[in-house]
Amino acid sequence: MSQITKRALEISLKNLLLQKPLNKITISDIANDCGINRMTFYYHFKDIYDLIEWICTEETARAINGKKTYETWQQGFLQTFQMILENKTFFSNVYHSISREKMEDYLYAVTFNFLIEVVEEKAVGMSVAESDKKFIANFYNFAFVGLLLDWIKKGMQEDPQLIIDQVNALIYGDVTRALTKYQFNNSNQMTQND
């Protein structure tokens, strides 16, 4: 029942965003549109921004779902762009109504989990420190989220497939090369310390 109510609140917020900007929407508006009382809203979310965070996280996780391998990461990113395009009103409002930093936080959290799995897959059989794997995943995470936010800021005009193709051309094989370099550097450091 909890997920059903959360989804209903998501639908209500998205419906209201078609009528007015985020900063003009209240919890009472969402509760009334959803047909629940305010206390039910507070049972699930502490405020509207908590609901927004949940929506962003859920939508992005669904878009990336099952695309967490090196062979499928491009599809996961493409589906993220497409999901945002399908929810253009919601994401445009969120982008322009909350701080860019908050939006980055939503996207970084979900895409980092996706990217670390890709890095882990390519690191199988290699001796690379966890901190180095996280650094590599973060590097790509910042690049991807930066491109995504820039695309949202510019009105989502560019074809997402072109962006993914450009990213793929730029980084093809780089995850493995980076892991190999970190493995080599770690081996050299251990030898020097002996």
Image (spheres, helix red, strand yellow):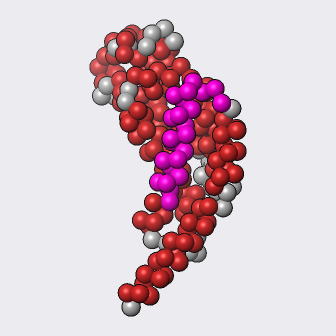
Residue 24 higher or lower than 6, as above or below = above
Q: Which residue is drawn at 60% across and 31% down?
A: 83
Camera sees residue 76: yes
Residue 68 higher or lower than 127, as above or below = above
Residue 55 higher or lower than 167, as above or below = above
Camera sees residue 1: no
Magenta segment includes 59: no
Depth check, front residue: 57 or 154? 154
Depth check, front residue: 56 or 89? 89
Q: Number of labelled discs? A: 0
Task: Give coordinates of residue 61: x percent, y percent.
Answer: 53, 41
Start and end of the magenta stretch? 136-158
Q: Residue at x 50, y 49 (%)?
A: 141
Is 177 displayed left or right of 6 in the figure?
right
State the residue lying farthest toward the bottom. Answer: 194
Position of the N terminus by quadrant:
top left
Magenta segment includes 143: yes
Depth check, front residue: 41 or 140? 140
Task: Give coordinates of residue 36: x percent, y percent.
Answer: 38, 14
Residue 126 sits in which quadrant? bottom right
Task: Give coordinates of residue 4: x percent, y percent.
Answer: 48, 27
Residue 47 sits in which quadrant? top left
- The majority secondary structure of the magenta stretch comes to helix
Q: Residue at x 42, y 65 (%)?
A: 131
